[in-house]
Image: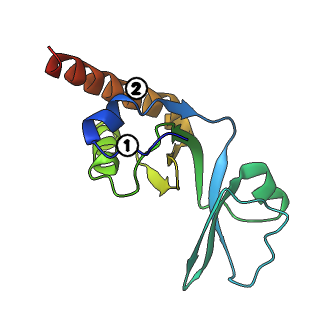
C-alpha cells in the first residue's frame, strides 16, 4: 500500500476522481434499527437517529424515506487524514459551479456525494481541478 499523501498540490494533481455506478441515498433510522440487510456504505450516529448512506433500491425496498439522492464520486488518491485543504479545494470548485456536495473521509480515500442530476458536471469540475493542479506541478518543476 502506498503512503498517504499530505501535500495539497500533490493531492489535487493525483486525486483521479471516479464516478461509481448507481444511485445512493441519505436516510435516517432509529438508533436501535436492524440495518444488517441494508449493507450501508456509511453510517453516522447522531442524537436524532442513525444516518445511513445506502443504495437507493435497498432503501426503497426497506421502506426508508430518501433524504437526498446522490451520485458517489471517489477520489482515488490515498489521502492523509491529516492533510489540510483538500476538502476545501474541491468543495470550492464544486460550489463555484453551483453543485452541492456531502463528503465522507475514509481511511484511504475521500468520497463525495453530489446530486444525481449533477454527477457528470461534478466529475468534470473535479477533473478540471486536477488538471490545473497538474499544470501547476509541471510549471513548478521547470
For residue 135, which quarter of the picture? top left
Residue at 40% x, 56% y: name it: 81
Q: Who is closer to the viewer here, 139 or 126?
A: 139
Specify whether 15 is left or right of 69.
Answer: left
**Is disc 1 placed on a helix, strand or loop?**
loop
Please determine whether, in this image, residue 83 is positioned above or below residue 46: above
For residue 42, which quarter of the picture? bottom right
| Number of other residues with Cα within 10 Å of mark 2, as a class: few under 14, some 14 to 19, many 20 or more | some
| Quarter that holds the N terminus | top right
Please determine whether, in this image, residue 90 is positioned above or below residue 29: above
| Quarter that holds the C terminus | top left
Please determine whether, in this image, residue 40 is positioned above or below residue 137: below
**Is disc 2 placed on a helix, strand or loop?**
helix
Q: Residue furthest top?
A: 142
> Disc 2 versus disc 1: distance between alpha carbons?
18 Å
Q: Which mark is residue 74?
A: none
Specify whether 10 is left or right of 136.
Answer: right
| Number of other residues with Cα within 10 Å of mark 1, as a class: few under 14, some 14 to 19, many 20 or more | some
Which residue corresponds to mark 2?
Answer: 127
Q: Who is closer to the viewer here, 142 or 50?
A: 142
Kindly report which numbered mark, 2 or 1, lies closer to the viewer in this rendering: 1
Mark 2 or mark 1, earlier in chain: 1
Please determine whether, in this image, residue 134 is positioned above or below residue 20: above
Residue at 85% x, 64% y: name it: 37
Which residue corresponds to mark 1?
Answer: 5
Question: Where does the image place residue 31, in percent across and percent down from the top left?
Answer: 68, 83
Image color mode: rainbow
Amino acid at each position: 500500500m502506498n503512503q498517504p499523501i499530505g501535500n495539497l498540490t500533490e493531492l489535487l494533481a493525483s486525486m483521479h476522481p471516479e464516478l461509481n455506478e448507481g444511485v445512493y441515498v441519505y436516510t435516517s433510522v432509529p438508533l436501535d434499527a436492524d440495518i444488517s440487510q441494508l449493507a450501508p456504505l456509511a453510517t453516522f450516529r447522531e442524537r436524532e437517529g442513525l444516518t445511513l448512506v445506502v443504495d437507493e433500491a435497498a432503501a426503497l425496498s426497506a421502506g426508508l424515506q430518501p433524504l437526498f439522492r446522490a451520485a458517489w464520486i471517489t477520489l482515488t488518491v490515498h489521502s492523509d487524514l491529516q492533510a489540510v485543504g483538500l476538502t476545501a479545494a474541491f468543495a470550492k470548485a464544486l460550489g463555484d459551479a453551483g453543485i452541492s456536495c456531502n463528503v465522507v473521509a475514509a481511511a484511504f480515500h475521500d468520497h463525495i456525494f453530489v446530486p444525481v442530476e449533477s454527477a457528470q458536471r461534478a466529475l468534470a469540475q473535479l477533473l478540471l481541478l486536477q488538471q490545473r493542479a497538474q499544470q501547476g506541478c509541471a510549471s513548478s518543476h521547470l
